[in-house]
Image (spheres, rainbow, N blue to C red):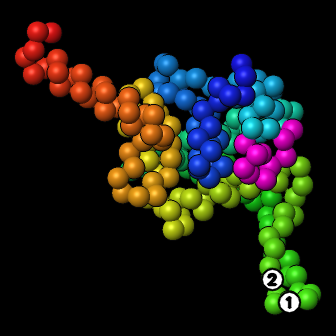
Amino acid sequence: MTAAEFPILGTEPLAVELANTLYGVGQAQIDFLADDRQVDQWFAEVSVRHEVAASMGRHAEQVRTLRDCVHALLSAAVEGRDPGTAAVERVNGFAAAAPTFLRLDWRDGPPAARRLDAATGAAAVLGRIATSCVELLTGPRAGRVRRCHGPDCSLFFVQHHSRRRWCHPSCGHRDRQARYYRRHLTSGGSG
Ligand SMILES: [Zn+2]
């Protein structure tokens, strides 16, 4: 598998991109982080946009655990139901293992704050993703997580404007095409 095949939207918070590595629903679900090499490749790919250590393959199991929990929380948010306590507690655990602190920089100009990780390595990366998940579900973007309406697409995305229904314009195109054909078939044509 090449990195280009990962379902990375390139527009979403890291927690959403991670959840999207569990693609599809039910029996047809595909795990894009099934082995260590894929985990390494995926992090290398997302590190272009997000500040994350590219070498996470050795921590693949923890990555998948966090991914499954984030996926469960985003699914619950989209479906408007209670997620249960297990996923909540695990995400909190990952976030607690990597606290951040503000560092004051005040030299040659106005005071500025920089957020730094207290942890390093894999714990910091996993913690940052967990924190991003908490912020997404509770911050100004709360209630804006959506699942793509495209046929056979299950990707999550954050809705920035009220009309966005698809993860990507190509899914919108496929969705409109599918609806066109359905209308055509059911409106009593030759088919
Ligand atoms: Zn889609």
Magenta stretch?
A: 46-55
What amino acid is found at the position of numbered circle 1 in the picture?
Answer: Gly
Residue receiving disc 2:
112
Where residue 156 appears, as percent x and y from the top left, is 50, 43
Tag 2–tag 1 contact (CB < 8 Å): yes
Residue 53 painted magenta = yes
Residue 137 at x, y = what percent?
Answer: 53, 58
| Residue 109 badge | 1
Quadrant of the drawing holding the N terminus = top right
In the image as oriented, which residue stretches furthest toward the right? 107
**What residue lies at 48% left-to-right and 18% top-to-bottom?**
27
Q: Main secondary structure of the magenta part?
A: loop
- The span from disc 2 to disc 1 (Cα, nearest Å) is 9 Å
**Residue at the image point whose x is 65% and y is 41% from the top:** 18
Residue 136 position by quadrant? bottom right
Label 1 Cα crowd, 10 Å radius (few <14 / some 14-19 / many 20+):
few
Q: What secondary structure is found at the residue carrying circle 2?
A: strand
Q: Position of residue 160 (x, y in %)?
A: 46, 58
From the viewer's perspective, is residue 149 above or below residue 180? below
Residue 73 falls left or right of residue 59 = left
**Residue farthest to the left, as pictured:** 188
Regarding residue 94, the answer to whether it shows in the image is no
Q: Residues within 10 Å of mark 2 (few under 14, many from 20)?
A: few
Tell me the tag on residue 99.
none
Residue 95 can be seen in this image? yes
Q: Of 148 and 97, which appears nearest the observer?
A: 148
Residue 72 image offset from top left, x and y in percent: 54, 42
Q: Element type at marker 1?
A: loop
Question: Image height check: is 102 above or below 119?
Answer: below
Q: Residue at x 74, y 34 (%)?
A: 42
